[in-house]
Image (tube, helix red, strand yellow):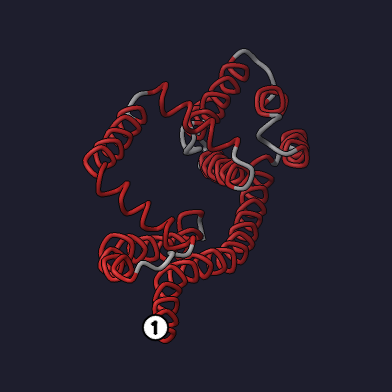
């Protein structure tokens, strides 16, 4: 299970809830507001907030749509450039939850590919060059290209990886690569690292999913509660006013 699969369910829930919220704020609540205003009752805070949001959307809907489309276009164009994609991948790695998972996924790809190439007899320099381009993150791939350059100049693979990726590869992984290279069994060690990292990614993603689902449920529950209060509290106040009248 990857990061995309982990956030798929929460994303769907959030998306549906947002659509329901927009529909309620822009379509249902304004129809009640006419009824509320005719009774001259003081609207509760949740209702006033949502009516204010509705008014803002109605007054600025063209600007909102333009801003969203402009932001999406600029972001998309930035990702099409090497510099933009590099900075985005660097930002992803700095994220507190997703960054460590992205690092482990890149390590897994690199180790699996390098293991396969080494087993099939591909020269180490060529194998490093190919494997370094499969990390799936341009920031990490640039670091791995430096590893290739160092090995080309005669340095050991483990030492080069430790020098250029010590903030990406965990210490125990660097140690395993060094042990494998010294023992002449780097392919076996790379395969073990890849499998171990795959298991770590799976574990973290499962924990992320287990954390996100109840959190999203609580947030959506609060949102729906506020929406319900915004609609039904004025109705209750209106009912009480009519009863006293």
158 on left or right of 137: right
Q: Where does residue 138 sit, x and y in percent of width and height?
A: 48, 30
Dot 1 falls on a residue whose secondary structure is loop
Q: Position of residue 180 (x, y in %)?
A: 73, 39
Residue 101: x and y in percent read 60, 47
Furthest-top residue in this view:
153
Residue behind mark 1? 245
Q: Residue at x 52, y 24 (%)?
A: 142
Residue pictured at 49% horizontal, 27% vertical = 129
Q: Is residue 106 above or below residue 22?
A: above
Residue under the point 69% across and 45% down? 189
For residue 204, which quarter of the picture?
bottom right
State which quadrant residue 118 falls in.
top right
Instruction: Locate residue 227: give its quadrant.
Output: bottom left
155 or 104, which is in the foreground? Answer: 104
Residue at the far bottom in the pictured view = 243
Marks counted in the figure total 1
């Amino acid at each position: 299970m990857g990061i995309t699969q982990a956030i798929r369910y929460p994303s769907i829930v959030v998306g549906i809830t947002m659509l329901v919220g927009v529909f309620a704020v822009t379509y249902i609540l304004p129809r009640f507001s006419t009824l509320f205003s005719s009774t001259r009752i003081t609207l509760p805070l949740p209702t006033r907030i949502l009516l204010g949001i509705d008014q803002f959307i109605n007054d600025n809907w063209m600007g909102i749509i333009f801003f969203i489309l402009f932001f999406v276009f600029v972001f998309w164009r930035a990702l099409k450039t090497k510099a933009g994609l590099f900075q985005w991948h660097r930002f992803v790695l700095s994220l507190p939850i997703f960054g460590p998972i992205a690092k482990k996924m890149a390590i897994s790809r690199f180790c699996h590919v390098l293991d396969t190439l080494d087993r099939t007899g591909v020269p180490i320099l060529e194998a490093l060059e190919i494997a370094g381009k499969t990390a799936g993150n341009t920031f990490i791939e640039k670091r791995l290209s430096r590893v290739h350059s160092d090995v080309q100049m005669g340095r050991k693979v483990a030492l080069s990886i430790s020098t250029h990726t010590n903030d990406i590869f965990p210490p125990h992984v660097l140690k395993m690569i060094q042990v494998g290279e010294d023992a002449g069994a780097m392919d076996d060690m790379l395969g073990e690292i890849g499998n171990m990292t795959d298991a770590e990614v799976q574990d973290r993603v499962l924990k992320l999913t287990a954390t996100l689902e109840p959190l999203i449920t609580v947030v959506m529950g609060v949102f729906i509660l506020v929406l319900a209060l915004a609609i039904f509290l004025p109705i209750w106040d209106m009912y009480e006013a009519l009863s006293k009248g």
